[in-house]
Amino acid sequence: MTIKDIKEKNLLLFDSVSGSQAYGTNLPTSDTDYKGVFVLPKDEYYSLNYIEQVSDASNDQVYYELGRFAELLSKNNPNMLEMLAMPEDCIQYQHSLYKSFKLEYFLSKLAKNTFAGYAMTQVHRAKGLNKKIHNPVSKERKNILEFCYVIVGHGSMPLNKWLAQTGYRQEYCGLVGIEHFRGTYAIFYDTNQTLGYKGIMNKPHSNDISLSSVPKGEQPIGYLSFNKDGYQVYCKDYKSYWDWVEKRNEARYKNTLEHGKNYDAKNMMHTFRLLDMAEEIATTRQINVRRPNRDFLLEIRSGKFEYNDLVVRAEEKIKRIDDLFESSSLPERPDLDRINRVLVEVREEWYSLEP
């Protein structure tokens, strides 16, 4: 099923512009996002072909099947709750049955975590971006040799430097583990290349050093330590960094570099939007999708504030929100029995209208 199918088959229950245009934080370059609710035809709903949601390739348009919509509402998912409070100028279509889903049926103290908790994940993401910008990882991947050291006198020397000074070749070396010394090995050398030593690194992308069988009577030429833990941390950081480079939104990344504050300003803007909405839910039991502090949010997006100052503000708001929800009269969770009744009534009424 496609979005075109939903609209042509008259399956829409609700359709609305969402995202920055609904919040009032859109810029001339902003995309137009849409979210909505549809109802599967009766035969598909009862079959094995249940479809939870339909979206376009860019996820700019996302439509949720009625059952999935109600399920996410019961969990106080922010995107779903916002659809119950959309500004009139954003609503493209609304079936009369959609009004059966009332905001007060769903708002609960779960919203503290779904709004404020999610907001803090944006702070952590911003911290991660800050770290990546300040600690770029070279595209040329290091190998295990760069995490090996040779004991020299009372100290140590990087293996590659030691090899260069001695003229030894790593592939002619044989390593034997030393009992009770984790990560430490005796180095043997096969000058004539007749002993079948496997070298220190058997393959260019080996993740561990190679051990060899060494004939009795051979004398070690030195002792090597392999920092395997350090190598594993490096591999994790390398993958994380280059996965991020591959997947990052280049326009937003360039904006981050341009404003010079080294954090994802758009993420931080949404952090404060969500925190403000969490505070409003606790105090007013309402959701204001169109943000009254648009100018402040756009100042964050433009990089006006220092990252650490925003983190401090966000943490202070979290503490205040915790206190507000603690004293709030909101229920701990939505009344699932009532939600189920509404869901069944809407679906039955919808199917009664099918030709």
Image (cartoon, rainbow, N blue to C red):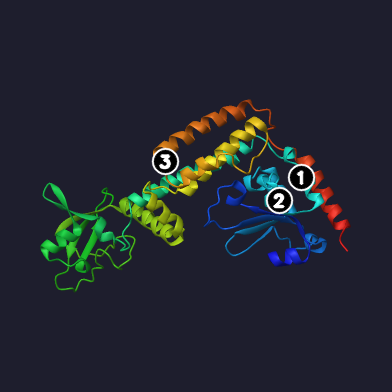
Q: Is residue 5 left or right of residue 188?
A: right
Residue 248 appearing in the image: no
Q: Which numbered circle lies on residue 69? A: 2
Of the 4 image quadrants, the one containing the N terminus is bottom right
Which residue is tagged 3? Answer: 305
Which of discs 3 and 2 lies nearer the camera? The answer is 3
Rounded to the nearest angstrom, the CA distance separating label 3 from label 2 is: 37 Å
At a point 79% along the width and 53% down the height, the residue shown is 95
Identify the mark at residue 294; answer none if there is no mark.
Answer: none
Q: Residue furthest top?
A: 327
Q: Amino acid at mark 2?
A: Phe
Give whichever of 181, 293 is nearer the camera: 293
Q: Which quadrant: the C terminus?
A: bottom right
Q: Quadrant of residue 337?
A: top right
Residue 147 left/right relative to 62: left
The mark found on residue 101 in the picture is 1
